[in-house]
Amino acid sequence: MDNVIRISSMVNAYLVKGDHTYLVDTMVPMSRKKLYAAMHDNGVSASDLSHILLTHYHADHIGNLCDIQAKGNPKVVAGAGDVPYIEGEIKPPAPSELSRAGKVLRKMPGLVEKYQKCKPGRVDETVEDGMKLEELGLEIVALPGHTPGGTSYVDRANNRAFIGDLVSNYFGRLGLPVLSSSYSLEEIEASLRKLAGLDLDYMYPGHGRIIGPGASKLVDRLIGKKF
């Protein structure tokens, strides 16, 4: 069974060590030293990474992608709908009006642009729902709603998944993704129902603590509270 190491600052990244050594998300640029220090403490350098799996395009998840690519040659994987944003072909949209915070942030474009600023990176493999990464033993389950190409990486053999921001877990309380950075409550609900139906023991979120045991059941309870 692969060893999953949570690296946490403002956001989570996950270092996975096994037959392959790979990273799920790359954190925000200001957390670069912490990311590299955690990798070093676990005997891993950028050149050791076989893959980087991106759950979505937001800057706090792709912030160090370009720097890692300059130091190594990992295969970068991302959902099709988010690739243009990751590669810098399309600028991130303004905050949505799904929440009051989003409506306020729309009036402060300079602040939003500063937070979203990071260097684009190259995506080597574009994935869609139902595809598999055979070499890593992972299945792709698309989770749109927060971003168009939001992607989870499901490890069926070990009943767990890396789920990005679709569910947070702060202080033991599950929550929805940040709505000001999302675009569709309907698609968020549909994606949550996907996760609830996977019967997973553990989920590794982009924000907060690891979810589980009984992760899918916990997500089902979240749906009942929010929808």
Image (spheres, rainbow, N blue to C red):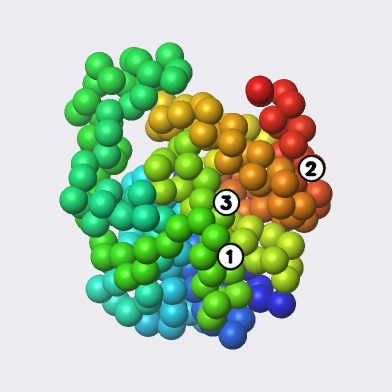
Q: Quadrant of residue 93?
A: top left
Q: CA distance from mark 3 to mark 1?
A: 12 Å
Residue 60 in view of the camera: no
Mark on residue 163? 3
Q: Nearer the viewer, mark 3 or mark 1?
A: 1
Report the amino acid beneath label 3.
Ile
Q: Helix, strand or loop at disc 1?
A: strand
Report the amino acid beneath label 1.
Glu
Q: Residue furthest bottom?
A: 19
User: Where does the image place residue 83, in percent across and percent down from the top left?
Assistant: 31, 55
Residue 96 in view of the camera: yes
Q: Helix, strand or loop at disc 3?
A: strand
User: Crowding at label 1, few (<14), some or many (≥20) Cα neighbours within 10 Å?
Assistant: many
Which residue is nearer to you in this view: 207 or 180? 180
User: Crowding at label 2, few (<14), some or many (≥20) Cα neighbours within 10 Å?
Assistant: some
Query: If you read the primary sequence from the N terminus, does the residue marked by circle 2 or circle 1 appear first?
Result: 1
Q: Write down the residue under mark 2.
A: 217
Q: Residue at x 74, y 62 (%)?
A: 159
Q: Quadrant of residue 153?
A: bottom right
Q: Residue at x 43, y 32 (%)?
A: 182
Query: If you read the primary sequence from the N terminus, does the residue marked by circle 3 or circle 1 appear first?
Result: 1
Q: Write down the residue under mark 1.
A: 139
- Left or right, 38 with respect to 45, comes to right
Q: Residue at x 22, y 25 (%)?
A: 109
Q: Are marks 3 and 2 in contact (CB under 8 Å)?
A: no
- Left or right, 30 with respect to 222, comes to left
Q: Residue at x 57, y 51 (%)?
A: 163
User: Where does the image place residue 58, in percent across and percent down from the top left?
Assistant: 37, 45
Query: If you read the primary sequence from the N terminus, does the residue marked by circle 3 or circle 2 appear first?
Result: 3
